[in-house]
């Protein structure tokens, strides 16, 4: 579909098109560091492709992970080097990271093995495989969802299918790529029929998530969706009360954003999700001052 026709179609449908508000600048620092900004030519609209039909959940949507249907391969990372320069876009530059070590590598292998053989709750009886996490293990940004869905359980990777594709576009909208952040879930196994995680299951997986946070040492955590936010922050407040606030988890700033599966079912809410992303970006930028 031609871009002009696509925009007219989206406008006619009442769907906002989201694009980054600041043109990203890629520096040598951004190439070397785990988190950088996508080049201006790679700026994407904050929408899933037009040629995909609306999701039809296999089961009643009792969980925000219910809309996952098609695996999307992560986009290849292509970044052109440029000499560092001072500009307003320097505010988007990544924070410095600790160097990678062989000790960290072994710690990650040990942790992933522990997750793979875990039988701490009944979910081990119904899973196809565990879903550990994916992304840059020294990323500034750590995104945490609630639990794997059907496609995640089959493929062993968090946030795939249409919800994962939209999450990728949400990440790109703030100048990042999936490969530059780390994505994980509170639960490492899929709850049957994508039901909400139970308290005992969250507790059983808490140590694994806590260890991931310790190894990544992120600068910012983003709770993806209401269920993840409520469990991570140990509150029953609705998402509307948790949005736009700088929280903390394990001593790390935490913000909240709508789950992409929810946005696929409620397209008008994308405007609020854009506000959430801008707020998360502002919190991240404040850490560099």
Image: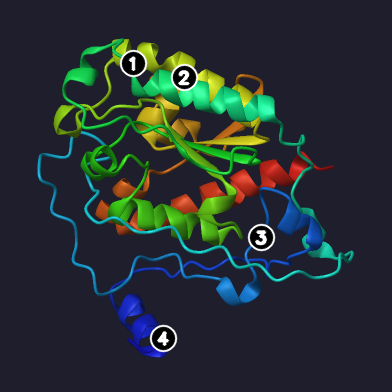
Q: Are marks 2 and 1 in contact (CB under 8 Å)?
A: yes
Picture residue at 14% right of the left edge, 32% below the top: 193
The residue labelled by disc 1 is: 118
> In this rendering, is residue 12 above or below 68?
below
Q: CA distance from mark 3 to mark 2?
A: 29 Å
Q: Are marks 2 and 4 in contact (CB under 8 Å)?
A: no
Q: CA distance from mark 1 to mark 4?
A: 48 Å
Tell me how the rendering is colored. rainbow
Label 3: state its secondary structure.
Answer: loop
Q: Mark 2 vs mark 4: give the one in front.
A: 2
Going from N to C along the chain, the mark reached first, 4 or 3, is 4
Label 1: state its secondary structure.
Answer: loop
The residue labelled by disc 4 is: 3
**Left or right, residue 87 beside residue 99:** right
Q: CA distance from mark 2 to mark 4?
A: 44 Å
Label of residue 208 in the image: 2
Q: Which of 13 and 210 lies nearest the eye of the viewer? A: 210
Residue 44 horizontal/vertical position (percent): 50, 70
Q: Which of 104 and 269 lies nearest the eye of the viewer? A: 104
Q: CA distance from mark 4 to mark 3?
A: 23 Å
Going from N to C along the chain, the mark reached first, 3 or 2, is 3
Q: Are marks 3 and 1 in contact (CB under 8 Å)?
A: no
Q: CA distance from mark 3 to mark 1?
A: 36 Å
Question: Could you classify mark 2 by the number of other residues whose Cα lies within 10 Å: few (under 14), some (14-19), or many (20 or more)?
Answer: some
Going from N to C along the chain, the mark reached first, 2 or 4, is 4
Residue sitting at the far left: 59
The residue labelled by disc 3 is: 37
Residue 213 seen in the figure: no
Question: Could you classify mark 1 by the number of other residues whose Cα lies within 10 Å: few (under 14), some (14-19), or many (20 or more)?
Answer: some
């Amino acid at each position: 579909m031609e871009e002009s026709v696509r925009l007219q179609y989206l406008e006619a449908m009442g769907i906002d098109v989201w694009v980054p508000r600041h043109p990203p600048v890629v520096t040598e620092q951004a190439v070397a560091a785990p988190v950088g900004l996508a080049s201006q030519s790679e700026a994407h609209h904050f929408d899933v492709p037009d040629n995909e039909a609306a999701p039809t959940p296999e089961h009643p949507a009792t969980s925000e992970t219910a809309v996952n249907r098609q695996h999307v391969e992560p986009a290849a990372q292509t970044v052109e080097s440029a000499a560092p320069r001072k500009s307003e876009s320097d505010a988007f530059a990544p924070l410095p990271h600790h160097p990678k070590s062989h000790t960290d590598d072994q710690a990650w292998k040990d942790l992933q093995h522990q997750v793979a053989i875990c039988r701490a709750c009944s979910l081990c009886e119904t899973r196809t495989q565990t879903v550990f996490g994916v992304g840059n293990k020294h990323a500034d940004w750590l995104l945490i969802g609630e639990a794997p869905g059907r496609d995640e359980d089959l493929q062993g990777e968090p946030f795939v299918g249409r919800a994962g594709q939209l999450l990728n576009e949400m990440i790109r909208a703030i100048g990042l790529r999936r490969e530059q952040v780390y994505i994980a879930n509170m639960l490492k196994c899929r709850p049957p029929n994508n039901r909400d995680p139970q308290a005992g299951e969250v507790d059983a997986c808490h140590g694994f998530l806590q260890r991931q946070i310790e190894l990544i040492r992120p600068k910012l955590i983003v709770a993806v969706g209401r269920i993840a936010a409520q469990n991570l922050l140990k509150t029953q407040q609705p998402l509307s009360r948790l949005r736009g606030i700088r929280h903390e988890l394990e001593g790390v700033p935490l913000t909240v954003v709508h789950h992409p599966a929810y946005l696929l079912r409620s397209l008008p809410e994308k405007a609020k999700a854009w506000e959430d992303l801008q707020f998360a970006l502002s919190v991240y930028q404040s850490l560099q001052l």
